[in-house]
Image (tube, rainbow, N blue to C red):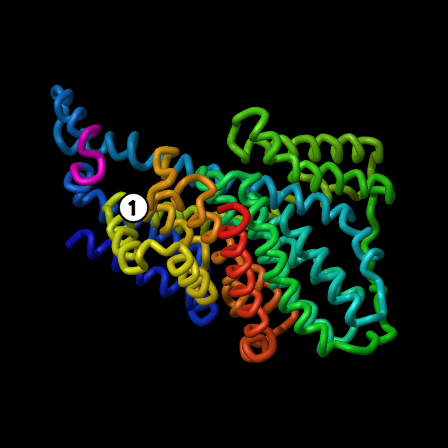
């Protein structure tokens, strides 16, 4: 009964999250309410769930309980051995995102991305398409796909004056940002989650997903470029209210190198130190913070407060971070009642253990619903297999196994099929007023074409290169 209530709470909450644009209630509020409700319900049957999921540890605690009551023992055991470990793993992801989002905000607010605009300036529609796509693809591998989309839209507004032309490029930014985030350990929230969880390694995901991700954007870009001809309008650009920066051109480029170069260095930092990725991001943020503070100290009385890190922290999207907290901790409650494990076993049996079927379906579903809870659910359904699984039917669940890598690819690129399927898509939809129907008619088939092309390329790699 309690299990059904927790699952029902999750489904109802998920429905409200999916209908955010209709209900006008921020999804973070729903996610937090759903999280607390699920854990309150969990506590009503905690003893049974602990006997099911933690039999040996809880049994040992019972045998040493002394004068403690059952209720107090259960409460302390849940806090120390269930809630805190899940909160710790969730916090790794949240602090990583907080640091990365702040780094990008600092670089962007101080003009660090300005030089990108000069690289892209061209009147040819076709040349601009390829330049935008490739720049977005590689930039998204370093930044997150949402931030990359926001940066590219700001640049496109300077380069493409006509809205009817710009929405075509904006739509391709969505595809390229999601594809670029899929092959990088720090390019997408879902890939970050898998990397931090130890399901994939930074080298493994880059080595085996780069080509499928590249093909997933090259194929739709090639198909679109065949029909894209002519020149852009003459008003290419210059905004009258161009902001005044307190950093010189050389200093802005230095900020870019420290910020973006630092984010690229994070996987290396983890390899060298063995520390979690969020520690590397906090290192980059601290260095960037110190550099900007030293610079502003040299300009006494300058109106620089709005560009200081302490002020820019206010611009970070904390509602998104709270959404991730609510979702990930809700999924943790589903894991602790055994539902995800049971569903994973059923799904694995129904698909005959075929990773392509399971992850392919997940990717298609992520076009409709947020991919973060989908990937979090899969991480709860399946465990990372150890080295002993090599050569067995569980080999695809090993670190860098085909299941985890396909999950990163499908969940990342599948969100491009519909404009509401990814954070990048929703953001661009609002910024450029792209309708759901227009995207469905003109772009969805391109995204679907790239999605399946990437899966085919991954299968070919598995068969003839990495198999």
Tag count: 1
Q: What is the x, y in percent for residue 318?
A: 53, 48
Secondary structure beneath disc 1?
A: helix
Which residue is at the front of the view, 216 or 307? 216
Q: What is the x, y in percent for residue 23?
A: 42, 69
Which residue is at the front of the view, 295 or 185? 185
Above or below — where is 333 with respect to 21? above
Which residue is at the front of the view, 430 or 344? 344
Residue shown at 59% from the left, 56% from the top: 213
Residue shown at 48% from the left, 38% from the top: 196
Let me know if residue 309 is in the magenta part: no
Q: Is residue 282 left or right of residue 365?
A: right
Q: What is the x, y in percent for residue 27?
A: 44, 59
Q: What is the x, y in percent for residue 144?
A: 60, 50
SS majority, magenta: helix
Residue shown at 29% from the left, 50% from the top: 340
| Residue 146 seen in render | no
Seen from this angle, which residue lies furthest front? 464
Magenta residues, as a range? 51-57
Q: Is residue 254 left or right of residue 19?
A: right
Q: Quadrant of the N terminus?
A: bottom left
Q: For mark 1, what is the residue?
A: 335
For residue 246, which quarter of the picture?
A: top right
- Within-10-Å neighbours for mark 1: few <14, some 14–19, many 20+: many
Let me know if residue 54 is in the magenta part: yes
């Amino acid at each position: 009964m309690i299990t059904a209530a927790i699952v029902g709470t999750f489904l109802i909450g998920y429905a409200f999250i999916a209908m955010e644009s209709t209900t006008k209630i921020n999804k973070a509020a729903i996610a937090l309410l759903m999280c607390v409700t699920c854990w309150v319900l969990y506590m009503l049957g905690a003893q049974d769930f602990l006997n099911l999921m933690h039999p040996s540890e809880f049994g040992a605690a019972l045998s040493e309980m002394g004068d403690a009551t059952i209720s107090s023992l259960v409460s302390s055991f849940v806090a120390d051995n269930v809630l805190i470990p899940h909160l710790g793993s969730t916090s790794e992801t949240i602090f990583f995102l907080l640091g990365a989002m702040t780094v990008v905000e600092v670089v962007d607010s101080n003009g660090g991305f300005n030089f990108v605009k000069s690289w892209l300036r061209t009147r040819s529609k076709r040349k601009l398409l390829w330049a935008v796509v490739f720049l977005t693809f590689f930039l998204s591998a370093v930044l997150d796909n949402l931030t990359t989309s926001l940066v590219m839209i700001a640049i496109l507004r300077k380069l493409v004056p006509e809205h009817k032309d710009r929405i075509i490029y904006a739509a391709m930014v969505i595809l390229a940002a999601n594809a670029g985030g899929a092959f990088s350990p720090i390019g997408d929230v879902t890939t970050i989650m898998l990397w931090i969880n130890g399901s994939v390694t930074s080298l493994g995901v880059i080595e085996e997903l780069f080509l499928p991700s590249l093909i997933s954007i090259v194929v739709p870009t090639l198909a679109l470029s065949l029909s894209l001809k002519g020149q852009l309008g003459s008003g290419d650009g210059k905004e009258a209210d161009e902001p005044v920066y307190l950093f010189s051109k050389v200093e802005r480029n230095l900020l870019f190198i420290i910020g973006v170069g630092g984010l690229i260095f994070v996987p290396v930092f983890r390899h060298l130190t063995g520390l979690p990725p969020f520690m590397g991001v906090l290192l980059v943020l601290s260095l960037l913070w110190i550099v900007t503070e030293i610079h502003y100290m040299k300009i006494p009385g300058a109106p620089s407060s709005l560009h200081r890190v302490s002020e820019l922290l206010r611009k970070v999207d904390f509602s998104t971070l709270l959404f991730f907290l609510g979702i990930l901790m809700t999924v943790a409650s589903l894991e602790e009642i055994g539902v995800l494990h049971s569903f994973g076993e059923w799904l694995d049996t129904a698909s005959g253990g075929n990773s392509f079927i399971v992850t392919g379906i997940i990717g298609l579903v992520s076009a409709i619903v947020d991919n973060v809870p989908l990937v979090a659910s899969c991480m709860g359904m399946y465990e990372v297999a150890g080295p002993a699984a090599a050569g067995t039917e569980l080999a695809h669940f090993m670190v860098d196994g085909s299941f985890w890598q396909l999950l990163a690819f499908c969940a990342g690129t599948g969100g491009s099929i519909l404009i509401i399927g990814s954070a990048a898509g929703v953001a661009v939809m609002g910024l450029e007023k792209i309708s759901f129907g227009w995207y469905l008619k003109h772009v969805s088939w391109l995204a679907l074409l790239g999605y399946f092309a990437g899966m085919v390329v991954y299968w070919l790699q598995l068969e003839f290169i990495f198999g």
